[in-house]
Image (cartoon, grey):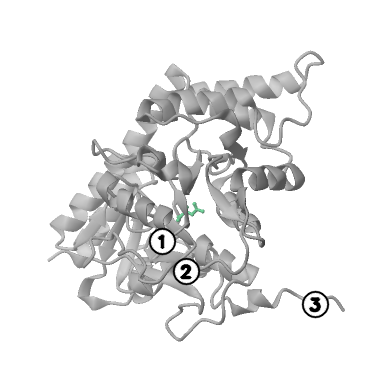
Amino acid sequence: MAHINDHYLKLKAGYLFPEIGRRVREFTTANPEAKVIRLGIGDVTRPLAPAVLKAFHEAIDDLGTTENFHGYGPEQGYDWLINTIIDKSYKPLGVELKTSEMFISDGSKCDCANILDIFALDNKVAIGDPVYPVYNDTNVMVGRTGEADEKGYYKGIVYMPFTEANNFIPDLPKEKVDIIYLCFPNNPTGTVASKEELQKWVDYANANDAVIFYDAAYEAFITTPGIPHSIYEIEGAKKCAIEFRSFSKTAGFTGVRCGLVVVPEAVMGTTEQGEKYSFNKLWNRRTSTKFNGASYPVQRAAAAVYSEEGWQQTKEIIDYYMDNARIIREGLQAAGIACYGGVDAPYIWLKTPAGLSSWDFFDKLLQECHVVGTPGSGFGPSGEGYFRLSAFGDKDKVIEAVDRIKKKWGK
Ligand code: MLT
């Protein structure tokens, strides 16, 4: 009989969002009349920008013609998309990248997981707490960890708490690590890091020959001037950082699927013999072996996000969500509930009222207000006592949800 990957059995709970879905389904089956408002998973609700939709349609029509038919594209993505992203999204930040340093994918969740393929198992990994669960769980799945302790910390991983006490910017690891996951604007806390703060991480990485995995999936939601949109705005980052970006939240592509990874040629690791080797070469090798490229219509739609019209329309949708974030933040504050984030990110991180545990608050909010959010403890032990609300809902529903919360919990 084939032997399973036993490392999967170390995972303590099911993946967070399916578990929330299960509880919500149970509640709605028992209470079919309840008008449930979902502000749990960060899933977009606005339609695609018209210019993006048009490009998508046109690309599909191309596939119905002999002249413009497209079969396999480059595994790394079409140059016309890569160069558009470099010109429109990185150059304005003062960041120069080569076409060969960017890889288009079918989404950032897979990229954040797949990147582990090109790193040896004996690398020491540092992960935030709370954190986007994919970083932690994929390290468990590949066998980099031991079992979890009673709190939920896996042996072998260095956890970096994001707390009120450190303003949700973790301290540098006390021990030497080889890989550091950073996500700013942060999921789940919605907080951001300044250039000075990121500089400390880049300096640490360069001094310790470590690699930073920088998840910038929410960079388009930054509103405060001066907050970096890319790790490459930080001096020295091109020598030590791999950046992940996503069209999911930026352009409403959660159902379309498109993301990208930047692996600068200067990011190096060592071979077993101690020779330097470029991670760009390895990622390129992996990509061409295990991936056949994001689909042509998806890449055409993604390129249209950066047309003048496309970006204007996309920005309006981002502003719509950020107005929702303001409504949630101000509503919670008016109700006397302490909260963070929601200024440069579409997530609001609130302290559960009355000292409730995250899951107790989840159940109460669902049963008494018919509002779904995400329990902070689902993102890691330091998330206990916190709760995340997403700003990706319809505005009228967001207003209604905040009203219900205020009525129930307002002082
Ligand atoms: C979230 O709610 O944290 C995200 O939507 C999950 C994801 O991007 O996969």
Q: Which residue is mark 3?
A: 3
Residue appearing at x 19%, y 63% in the figure: 337
Q: CA distance from mark 3 to mark 2?
A: 38 Å
**Picture disc at residue 407:** none
Residue appearing at x 64%, y 19% in the figure: 58
Q: What is the three-letter code of the residue carrying label 1?
A: Ala
Q: Quadrant of the C terminus?
A: bottom left
Q: Earlier in the sequence, mark 2 or mark 1?
A: 2
Report helix, strand or loop for mark 3.
loop
Report helix, strand or loop for mark 1.
loop
Of badges 1 and 3, the one in the foreground is 3
**Picture disc at residue 34:** 1
Apparent side of residue 363 relative to residue 164 in the rendered image (left or right): right
Residue 329 position, x and y percent, is: 23, 52
Neighbor class of circle 1 (other Cα within 10 Å; few <14, some 14-19, many 20+) is some
Q: Which residue is mark 2?
A: 27
Q: Is residue 290 above or below residue 273?
A: above
Q: Quadrant of the N terminus?
A: bottom right
Confirm or deny contact between disc 2 and disc 1 (CB under 8 A). Answer: yes
Q: On the image, which quarter does residue 76 sit in?
A: top right
Residue 391 position, x and y percent, is: 35, 48
Q: Nearer the viewer, residue 91 or 256?
A: 91
